[in-house]
Every structure is written in C-alpha cells, then in structure tokens.
Image (cartoon, rainbow, N blue to C red):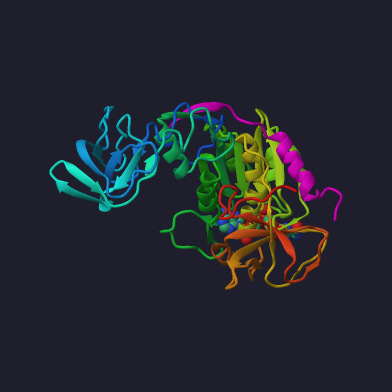
Amino acid sequence: MSQDTLAYDEALRIVLGASAKLGTEDCSLSACLGRVLAEPVISAVNLPPFDNSAMDGFALSGSSIVPAGTELAIEGEQAAGDGVVHAGIGAWEIMTGARIPDGLDRVIPVEQTERFAPSRVRLLADVTPGQNVRTAGSDVACGETLLDAGIALQAQHLMLLAALGIANVTVTERPRVAVICTGRELVDDPAQALEPGQIRNSNGPFLAARLPLAGADVVHVETVGDDTDAFESAMRRALSAGAKVIVTSGAVSMGRYDFVPHALQRLGAQTLFHKVAIRPGKPLLFARLPGDVLLFGLPGNPIAVAVGLRFFVEPALRVMLGMPRETSRRIALVTPYSKKPRLRFHLKSRLHVDAQGRLGVEVLDGQESYRIRPLAGANAWAVVPAEVDALPAGALVDVYGVGHLEFPLPYGSAA
Ligand SMILES: Nc1nc2c(c(=O)[nH]1)N[C@H]1C(S)=C(S)[C@@H](COP(=O)(O)OP(=O)(O)OC[C@H]3O[C@@H](n4cnc5c(N)ncnc54)[C@H](O)[C@@H]3O)O[C@H]1N2
Ligand code: MOO
C-alpha cells in the first residue's frame, strides 16, 4: 500500500472533522417528512385529551362492579365531538371516541346490553370501574419527551405531531448538494442513440435519486466532458446554486484525462486526501474549497460511486444534519467469504431470513465495480475490514442499510 493511501477510519475521521452541523429552521408539518429534528418534541398536552369511550355502548358509574342484570334509565346520548355533560345516576348511550359524561367511569359495549323500553337498558354482563375508558394522557402525558433531536421524521412521527396539534417543528437545514458527472463518453438523454464508445450516464441519476433519500437538497446536477475548463465552469455554477457539498463522479484516477485533482488546485481547493484503502472506490478524493464547501471526488465506476456516497458522503451529511454517528449491525454470513487483505471491502449484499427465522447476510455474486445489476438486487452493504482475508459461514460481519436512513432492522448498541 503506498504511503499516501489512507486507512478508511483515518479518512472518515478527516471527513467528519471537516463537516459541521448546519443551522436550523422551522418546518410545517406538511413539509417535514424526512427532515431531521433539531430539537426534541415535548408534549404540551395530554393524549387522549379527555377520557373517552373505546366502544359503542352505555356509560355508567358505580362504587365497584355493577353486576349483570342491573337495569338503568337512559339519561342521554353522547357522540364523538359532543362536549361536557354532567351525568346523574343512570346510563348514557355513548359512541366510540365520545367524551365520557362527567360523573361516569365505565362503558359496557352495546352487544352486552338489552334495551327493554324506549329509555331503559339492562346489563347482560358485569361492568368494572374504568372498563372501556381511554383515560386522558394514557397515550401521551403532558410534559413527556416524545421524539429526540437527530431523528429523521417518518409518517408515524407526523401522526403523533398532528395528534398533539404541533403545526411546526424545528429541523436542521438540509445540506445543499451539487452533482457533477465527468466523462466525454457519457450520454444523458435516453432518447439519444449511442455512438461507438459512448455509454449512458447512470451515476448522475443514481446520485440525484439517492441524495434526497439521505437528507440532502440537490441544488445542481450537471454532466461535463473531460475538460478542465468545462469542469471549472460547472463547479462555479454549483457554487452559485448554493452547494455546500459537491459530489463529482470520474476523473480522479491515474489516466491522462483524470483532471479533477488539477482543476481543484486551480479552484483554490485544499485536498485533504486522495486514495483510501478500500474497494471499490480506492482513488476517492476529498477536498475543501474556499467557503468551507466540501468536495467528494468519487471514482467513476458506478459501484465506487455508490460506496463513496454511502461510506463518505452520507457520514458527512449525518454530521451536517446533527445526527449521531452511524453504527453497523453485526449479522452472520450465510456462505464463506474471502478477499485480498489490506483493503476494506464494501460488498453488495442481501439480508435473508431462513425458514427457522434466522437472519443472515449473503454477499452477492458480481462484486466488480462496473457491475450495477447486483446492486439492484442488494438490500444492504456488508463491510469486511482491511486486515481480514477469509471468513467462514456464520462469521459476523458489519452490515449497513442501502442508505443511512434506510434499514429494516433497528441499530444495535455501539458496544
Ligand atoms: N492505472 C490505473 N487505472 C485505474 C486505477 C488505478 O489505480 N490505476 N484505478 C481504477 C479504479 S479502482 C477506478 S474506480 C477507476 C476510477 O477512475 P476515474 O475516477 O478516473 O473514473 P473514469 O475513468 O472517469 O471512469 C471509470 C469508469 O466508470 C465509468 N463511468 C464514469 N462516469 C460514469 C457515469 N456517470 N455513469 C456510468 N459510468 C460512468 C467510465 O466510463 C469508466 O468505465 O479507475 C480505474 N483505473
Ligand atoms: O476500486 Mo475502483 O473504485 O472499483 O474500480
């Protein structure tokens, strides 16, 4: 390994150190799906807000059990949406969700009753105190912390916020990211026929689709040929669009047209590293532009782009979004795996649950960095450290979701 090739952990340390948490903004409930909370949400109200009925039936009261056979006068009717009423000693016909009349403390379902006169009811079962009453604050008590800062809001969080009457939340600003793909072989327009030697740009659409799923705001996307001047102009457009992070694909390796390092010098960038002991994506370049704009120069092979995004850009986005550092899940390999030592491998993988309910991870065939079809069948990344060369079936490996906000299993503790 050449001396200027960094270990992944060291490279990540540099990336995290160069990334800073962004500011905060208010966001309405209708616009906050996927946004990251900058402050915890503390309930200022009870949920349910009042004692209410879990059943359609009759509300009544008593000092202890009211036995089957009891006959009561029906004093009134209480439907969902009706306000405060004061009850006497009889029963109130009540609907699911309706406020329990003051003075009553239990509900018998209608199917356990018999109406034997227009306004009289007989109980066919015993009724205990509190039965079928959903008490105020039993779901959420006023003053409780419900959602922690640093979580990405999902639909179920919006359900809770809506129920609490919270119209706005404080979220972290979304990192503004630009994508620039380089390569004179690239064709963006799917309707354009390919000339010999040309290929379609797949990294651009991939990055533009994945970045918002990782919490970013994609502010500029452009494709340029292998031309330093065109690249510099694209970089300037990305900066004027307000990008705080620029992700490029291609032109960072050893070839004659690998001009990104040189172009970055001309733009006054400080290269923080170039080449990491990983596969794929070894020629990855990380630089800081004037104005603290971060540049990730991802090697052009499509899986090198996916790995660069997942294991370098996404950790930086987490810092910017105020999220804690990600931890892996340790999951057993379903088949043996071996690799060259000295490079940390990031493997297109699939999680399975077998017939006995055991979870395992399969390293997919076709790990070369030009093969994009296996990525389409992957639902996770397995990571094998640099020092390891062979692992038997059943060995635990570090597994990460396809994106840092997407994994079907909860994270384990860092221990
Ligand atoms: N002599 C050496 N050659 C290479 C080395 C090396 O160490 N020594 N490293 C290899 C590795 S590893 C990688 S990864 C690539 C990285 O090369 P570049 O970043 O300079 O990328 P390009 O040469 O521009 O492209 C590589 C490959 O990817 C295709 N590509 C590029 N952009 C796109 C896109 N937007 N959509 C789809 N495919 C794209 C491009 O056509 C090339 O096939 O270098 C190796 N070579
Ligand atoms: O290691 Mo490169 O990034 O795969 O071809």
Position of residue 412 relative to residue 384, above or below, is above
State the residue in front, 17 or 223.
Answer: 17
Work out which residue is located at the far left of the displayed protein and give it. Answer: 118
Position of residue 35 relative to residue 382, above or below, is above
State the residue in front, 109 or 374.
Answer: 109
Taking the spot 47% from the left edge, 26% from the top edge, the residue there is 44
Res 184 seen here: no
Position of residue 300 relative to residue 119, above or below, is below
Taking the spot 71% from the left edge, 49% from the top edge, the residue there is 284
Res 168 seen here: yes
Figure quarter occupied by ligand 1: bottom right
Left or right: where does residue 104 sit relative to residue 319?
A: left
Q: x%, y% of residue 275?
A: 76, 50
Q: x%, y% of residue 277?
A: 78, 54
Q: x%, y% of residue 325?
A: 68, 42
State the residue in front, 80 or 149.
Answer: 80
Q: Quadrant of residue 65?
A: top left
Taking the spot 50% from the left edge, 40% from the top edge, the residue there is 153
Quarter of the picture holding the N terminus: bottom right
Q: Does the magenta stretch include residue 150?
A: no
Left or right: where does residue 328 sit relative to residue 118?
A: right
Q: x%, y% of residue 197?
A: 56, 64
Boundaries of the magenta span: 1-28
Q: Quadrant of residue 273?
A: top right
Q: Does the magenta stretch include residue 3?
A: yes
Position of residue 8 relative to residue 269, above or below, is below
